[in-house]
Amino acid sequence: MNKVFDFESTSTFLNAILNDESTPRGTRTLLADHLGVQKTFISLLSSGKQSMSLEQALKIAKFFNLNRDETYYLVTLAQINRTSDPELIKIFESQKEKIISKHNKIANRIKVKESLDVADQQIYYSNPHYTFLHILSAIPGFQTIEKMAEVLHLDLELTKKYLNFLISCNLVKKNDKKPGEFQIGGMRIHLPKDSPLLPAFHTHLRNHALSRISKSQPDDVRYTATYALTKNQYKKIKDILLTSLENVEKSAALKGATPETLCVMNLDFYEIGN
C-alpha cells in the first residue's frame, strides 16, 4: 500500500491508494459510506476537482488505518491544498517537513513494518480463532498445528486454513529451526478504537466468553453487577478500571517473560440510557 509521505497532495494520495492492486474491490463504496457522501464525491476528491476538508482528511486517515504521524501529514496536506495565502502555506509546509523529518528518523532507527490492509483486517477480525492462533504461535508448547487444534477444539483442516491466512499476512511464520512448529511473525497489527471493525471484534470475543460460562474453571474470573451511582461515583469507578487496564497492559508487555498460556479478557462498564 502506498505511503502517504510519498505524496504532495491529498488527491494524488487518495487516487493512488484507491487504485492500488492491494486495495479490495468495493473500497470506494465503503469509504463513501464512512464519509457520509455519494460515491461520485470520492472521484472528485481523488481527481483533485474537489478540495478535501480537514474533517474528511481525518476520517480518511482513520478509514485506511494511518498512524498518528501519517494522519498529521495527510491533514497538513489538506490544509496546504485548501489555502492560497503564502504565509499560511509557508507555515503548513514547515509543519509538513517536521513530520517527514520525524518519520525518517524513526524509520532509520527501526525496521518499519506494514500493517494489515483493509481486506486482511476484515478477515482477521471476522473470527476470534485468527487472534487465538496468532497469539498461540508465540507460546512454547502450543506451537504445533496439532496442539493449537486441540486447545481451540478445532478440526485440523480448519486450523490449517486459518494458519495459512496468518502465514500469508506474515502474522505467523514457520519455525525453520524446529520443523513442524510455528512462531509469531513480524507483521504489525493494530485496530484503532474508532475502526468500523472493532464492534464485531468485541462481539466475537464476548460471544466466546459466553460459550465458556457453562465450562467455567476454578481459576476463571467472572463478575456481573448493576449499580445505582452518582455521576461522581461513576467517574471514579471508571478511572479505577482504566488505571487497572493500564497496569494489565504493562504486565502483559513485560519484556523477558516467556508466555505460558492464552487468556481472554472482556470488560464492559457503561451507563444505561446513554
Image: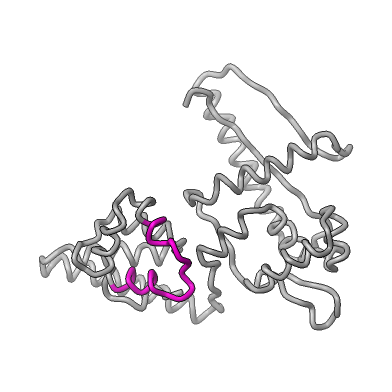
Residue at 73% over, 66% down: 161
Left or right, residue 87 beside residue 230 = left
Percent of width and height locating residue 8: 27, 75
Instruction: Tell me which corner region of the image, top left, top right, bottom left or bottom right, holds residue 169.
Output: bottom right
Percent of width and height locating residue 189: 59, 63
Left or right, residue 90 beside residue 186 = left
Left or right, residue 26 beside residue 36 = right
Q: How many marks?
A: 0
Percent of width and height locating residue 132: 73, 56
Does the magenta portion include 30? Answer: yes
Does the magenta portion include 198? Answer: no
Q: Which color scheme does this rendered protein use?
A: one colour
Percent of width and height locating residue 143: 83, 67
Please name whichever residue, 9 or 197, is drawn nearer the observer in this view of the structure: 197
Q: Is residue 3 above or below residue 198?
A: below
Q: Is residue 196 above or below residue 16?
A: above
Instruction: Tell me which corner region of the image, top left, top right, bottom left or bottom right, holds residue 269.
Output: top right
Provide the major secondary structure of the magenta segment.
Answer: helix
Residue at 80% over, 83% down: 176
Q: Which residues are magenta?
A: 12-31
Instruction: Tell me which corner region of the image, top left, top right, bottom left or bottom right, holds residue 41.
Output: bottom left
> What residue occupies the far top of the structure in this picture?
228
Residue at 38% over, 62% down: 71
Residue at 61% over, 44% down: 202
Left or right, residue 104 beside residue 186 = left
